[in-house]
Amino acid sequence: MMNNATVYDCIGSVLAKSGCWSFLKGGFVLDSPSKLSILYFQSSYGKDVKIAVASSSLQAFSDQEWRTNQQYIINTKRKRAATIHVADSNGDTLQGATITITQVAKDFPFGSAIASTILGNGAYQKWFAKRFNAAVFENELKWYATEPQQGNINYTRADQMMEFVRSNQIIVRGHNIFWEDPKYIPAWVRNLTGPALKSAVQERIQSLMCKYKEEFIHWDVSNEMLHFDFYEQNLGPNATLNFYETAHKSDPLATLFMNDYNVVETCSDVKSTVDNFILRQRELELGGVSMDGIGLEGHFAKPNLPLTRAILDKLATLGLPIWLTEVDISSNFDKQTQAVYLEQVLREGFSHPSVNGIMLWTALHPNGCYQMCLTDNDLQNLPAGDTVDKLLEEWETGDIAAQTDEHGSHSFLGFLGEYRVTVKYGNGTKNSTFSLCSGRETKHFSIQL
């Protein structure tokens, strides 16, 4: 889409093959009213290409229509209707029984990165555990942190952080086994070649995954492999396949992710277009490896939500769980603008039926955060923190106090998760628990006093 005489925005991309039809899906937001939009097709390789369009469609949505659609998906995918039936010991329904319902756990994982700065900081720990049910260690599991010198392996920080997440029933992602970017590979590893390098990477996988077997729900196995290929350059084209094979054997229950940036944020990065992601995933699959999850980092500048949705839709065709793994908004924006854009991204992610979890990249340090903080150093909310708190409250079922109707029942629409219910009738009281899991039918629960 052309904004002016010299600047073009990428609004969609496709990896096309000669002689074949390819499916291109994208989207854009108009900054001002317009009766005309001109779409330009351009080859990223600088070559002249002949393009034939067999079927084209451009559909417009107002902001209200977009939000209405998001809410519809939330109501149908993130919630479920439930009916509680109350009866006495004879099976007779009880009208006018008092019901109190409280959601005690959320099904949807929503969390943030944490760093060792959370250790010994009781206030920060309390603040985090109050909000989030998922976490990821920012740097503490990366190879340069656990083995800065060959043979000097130290998991002390990671162990201490594991104690925190365990004690608060917080699930945690494993990030990462290998990072393909040479800047973040230990210097001693970069200096290895041949069998010595092969031995070192095998020892890295075995050490890390044997120590933490069944502790992490996910592992980012070979991080940012679309942008960098250090290990394949030095160990051969099957290096990544071997990483996934070994990781799967080491911890068969962990979901192994392919994690990268600029996949969902933009289509301007030719290394990480959605089709390149899909192509790489299929190469791994054909190689016989178990790559079970799609990790989209989500380091956004100004979000293009229609493009984001189009990319998520296309990735969803793989049938794999999709997580937004490192969400933040560029520090080039002021804090209020960061909050506005963050809300847009989080609403889009939460309302997409194929997104299974969202992680923020907001680990707090004395000198700030990577790009965006939720609080200041005194744990007072910044605008982005207010946005997160508002959405967390919006995306949970508030306490319900009601009475059973003439049929001895009460119905409600609740977010998926775990619930506690108390029923009182006369002198009798009954406490119970139930789960709301995904499903289209109304879930029925019976309680007998």
Image (spheres, rainbow, N blue to C red):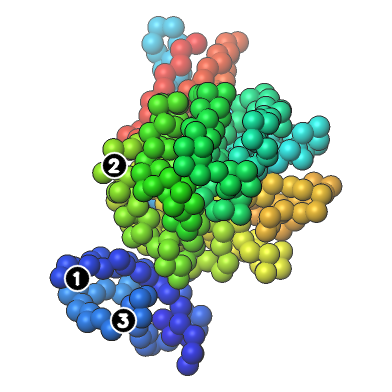
Residues at marks 1 and 3 touching, judged by CB atoms closer than 8 Å: no
CA gap, disc 1 and disc 3: 13 Å
Label 1: state its secondary structure.
Answer: loop
At x 64%, y 35%, the residue is: 150
Which residue is denoted by mark 2 in the rendering?
A: 287
Q: Position of residue 331 (x, y in %)?
A: 68, 64
Q: Is residue 398 above or below residue 327?
A: above
Label 3: state its secondary structure.
Answer: loop
Label 2: state its secondary structure.
Answer: loop
User: Does residue 219 appear in this view?
Assistant: no
Q: Position of residue 408 (x, y in %)?
A: 43, 23
How crowded is the residue under tag 2: few (<14 C-alpha within 10 Å), some, or many (20+)?
A: some
Which residue is denoted by mark 3 in the rendering?
A: 47
Q: Is residue 441 above or below residue 23?
A: above
Q: Earlier in the sequence, mark 1 or mark 2?
A: 1
Which residue is denoted by mark 1 in the rendering?
A: 18
Q: Quadrant of the N terminus?
A: bottom left
